[in-house]
Amino acid sequence: MSNKYAPVFINSTHFTSIALIILVFLFLSCTGESNTTTIVIPMESSIPTSEATPKQPKQNYTPPLTKSITPTATPEVEALFLYSRGLNLFRAEKFIESVNAFSTLIKRMPNLAIAYKSRAAAYYHMEKFELAKKDIEQALLLDVDLGGAYLYLGLIHKKEGDIELAQKNLQMAVNLIHPIRETEELRIAESALGNLNK
């Protein structure tokens, strides 16, 4: 009758198999991103010690990630790209394409006031004043201090012959437009305000 508690002796074949498994495990656990590899092998210690130690609970092994995650563009970076594209098209006087670029930006970031203001500017140059007014209204709901919105609102009122409203909005534009970041818009506002009564 065999004793089920008899000691197990490891022969050279078993030792080679265990060594091969450890080497494969080491190879698979390396990610190429660090110089060190930590191996956690859950096991119970059967080595006798001079002091009695409490049994440690088994640790769950979590394999390292082997797949790198490709970062995607953040909404801010994408918005900056779309805004720059729309602005370049606007400066090239490609107003329809500019409207399309700003419309895409508005769909992705509907709370971006400068996108509405910029699309309103393109609509203004296309003489679609009602669409421009709607965008200006939305831009000012989002940012009441957006000077460029007052500029185009003033220019629309001037075209429509409402000099009083044109003057009021153009003066707001001159007061609010940043003199360094928005030099061109400030120049247009000051010129339009100066030529209002001519």
Image (cartoon, grey):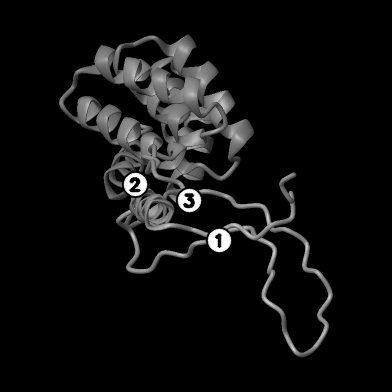
Front-lying residue, 50 or 131: 50
Q: Is residue 62 above or below residue 194?
A: below
User: Left or right: where does residue 32 sit relative to residue 36?
Assistant: left
Mark 1 sits on what residue?
Answer: 40
Which is in the foreground here, disc 3 or disc 2?
3
* Three-letter amino acid code at the position of disc 2: Leu
User: In the rendering, at what x and y percent does residue 161 appear?
Assistant: 44, 17
Q: Secondary structure at mark 2?
A: helix
Q: Can you see residue 162?
A: no
Q: Secondary structure at mark 1?
A: loop
**Mark identifier at residue 64:** 3
Front-lying residue, 188 or 165: 188
Front-lying residue, 52 or 104: 52
User: Left or right: where does residue 66 sit relative to residue 5?
Assistant: left
Report if the CB atoms under discs 3 and 2 are less than 8 Å apart.
no
Q: Earlier in the sequence, mark 1 or mark 2?
A: 1
Residue at the location (58% across, 50% down)?
A: 62
Q: Is residue 64 above or below residue 96?
A: below
Distance between mark 3 and mark 1 Cα atoms? 11 Å
User: In the rendering, at what x and y percent does residue 84 appear?
Assistant: 28, 36
Distance between mark 1 and mark 2 Cα atoms? 66 Å
Check disc 2: other Cα within 10 Å, few if <14, some if 14-19, many if 20+. many
* Three-letter amino acid code at the position of disc 1: Val
Residue at the location (60% across, 40% down)?
A: 144
Distance between mark 3 and mark 2 Cα atoms? 57 Å
Front-lying residue, 110 or 171: 110
Residue at the location (41% across, 18% down)?
A: 103
User: In the rendering, at what x and y percent does residue 137 appear?
Assistant: 58, 24
* Three-letter amino acid code at the position of disc 3: Pro
Which is in the foreground here, disc 3 or disc 1?
1
Mark 2 sits on what residue?
Answer: 186
Q: Which of the 4 image quadrants contains residue 192?
A: top left
